[in-house]
Image: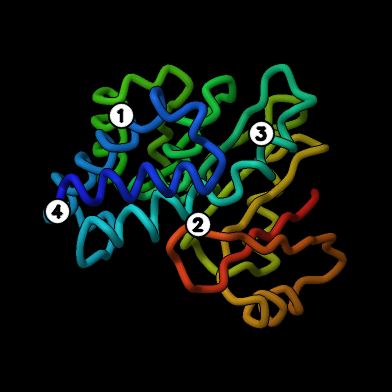
């Protein structure tokens, strides 16, 4: 089972165009999967039935918009990303593994999960990632001290109050990136937001036969 799921992860990375970086990325992601599995029974980090589901629905899903995020970062010498409601570190940790030149902040309010994130980062040795154990609303950033990108996955549904709090984390030119499922559900969710510029990008998650999209929202 262990060998077959490692092959699955390797094949998934190849489908995402990451085979050239595989020698660096694969061992880190395998270690991360092992850390989640070790702490998941006690911390309830993710709901999965087995390792295959963890790899496909969480690791590869987190990496599906990597090229989109790369494009957003290409004109920045110091690209700063916040993963809000990070939980098990998804999507922040897989993205940080693949984007070592970007600076990631994992925002998690629950103490046990924040502790897991710190432990996982110590095991992985990722110098480009920090953990903020706090609520999103308690982070105060203005102007150029804000983030270029704020990502969130399996977070609260978007409404005007949440959007205002997320925008407060961004630089004036920053972008929100929401991991979402079905296009119809996205359109229903976004219909209630006024005067918001947004774009829906279809995503292909290796080995997952479900609709997945990234919603980009400009400040």
Report helix, strand or loop for mark 2: strand
Mark 2 burial class by Cα count in 10 Å: few <14, some 14-19, many 20+: many
Structural distance between the alpha carbons of marks 2 and 4: 28 Å
* Placement of 25 over or under 41, stated as above or below: above
The residue located at (66%, 40%) in the rendering is 69
The residue located at (67%, 82%) in the rendering is 184
Report helix, strand or loop for mark 3: strand
Mark 3 lies on residue: 147
Q: Earlier in the sequence, mark 4 or mark 1?
A: 4
Mark 1 burial class by Cα count in 10 Å: few <14, some 14-19, many 20+: some
- The answer to which of 159 and 82 lies nearer the viewer is 82
Structural distance between the alpha carbons of marks 2 and 1: 24 Å
Q: Earlier in the sequence, mark 3 or mark 4?
A: 4
Quadrant in which residue 164 is drawn: bottom right
Structural distance between the alpha carbons of marks 3 and 4: 40 Å
Mark 4 lies on residue: 1
Report helix, strand or loop for mark 1: helix
* Placement of 99 over or under 159, stated as above or below: above
The residue located at (80%, 48%) in the rendering is 219
Which label lies toward us, 1 or 3? 1
Report helix, strand or loop for mark 4: loop
Quadrant in which residue 28 is drawn: top left
> Which numbered dot is residue 204?
none
Percent coordinates x, y for residue 103 in the rendering = 56, 24
Q: Earlier in the sequence, mark 2 or mark 4?
A: 4
Mark 1 lies on residue: 27
Percent coordinates x, y for residue 159 in the rendering = 65, 69
Q: Is residue 71 left or right of residue 51?
A: right
Percent coordinates x, y for residue 48 in the rendering = 25, 64
Mark 3 burial class by Cα count in 10 Å: few <14, some 14-19, many 20+: many
């Amino acid at each position: 089972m262990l060998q077959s799921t490692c092959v699955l992860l390797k094949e998934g990375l190849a489908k995402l165009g990451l085979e050239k970086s595989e020698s660096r990325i694969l061992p880190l992601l395998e270690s991360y999967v092992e850390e989640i599995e070790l702490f998941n029974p006690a911390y309830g980090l993710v709901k999965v039935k087995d390792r295959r589901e963890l790899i496909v629905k969480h690791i590869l899903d987190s990496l599906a918009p990597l090229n989109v995020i790369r494009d957003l970062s290409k004109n920045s010498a110091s690209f700063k990303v916040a993963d809000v409601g990070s939980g098990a570190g998804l999507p922040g940790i897989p993205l940080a593994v693949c984007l070592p030149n970007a600076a990631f902040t994992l925002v998690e309010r629950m103490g046990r999960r924040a502790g897991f994130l710190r432990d996982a980062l110590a095991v992985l040795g990722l110098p480009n990632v920090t953990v903020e154990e706090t609520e999103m609303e308690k982070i105060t950033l203005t102007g150029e001290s804000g983030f270029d990108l704020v990502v969130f996955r399996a977070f609260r549904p978007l409404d005007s109050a949440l959007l205002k709090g997320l925008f407060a984390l961004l630089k004036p030119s920053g972008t929100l990136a929401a991991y979402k499922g079905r296009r119809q559900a996205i359109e229903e969710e976004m219909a209630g937001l006024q005067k918001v510029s947004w774009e829906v990008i279809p995503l292909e998650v290796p080995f997952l036969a479900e609709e997945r999209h990234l919603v980009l929202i400009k400040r």
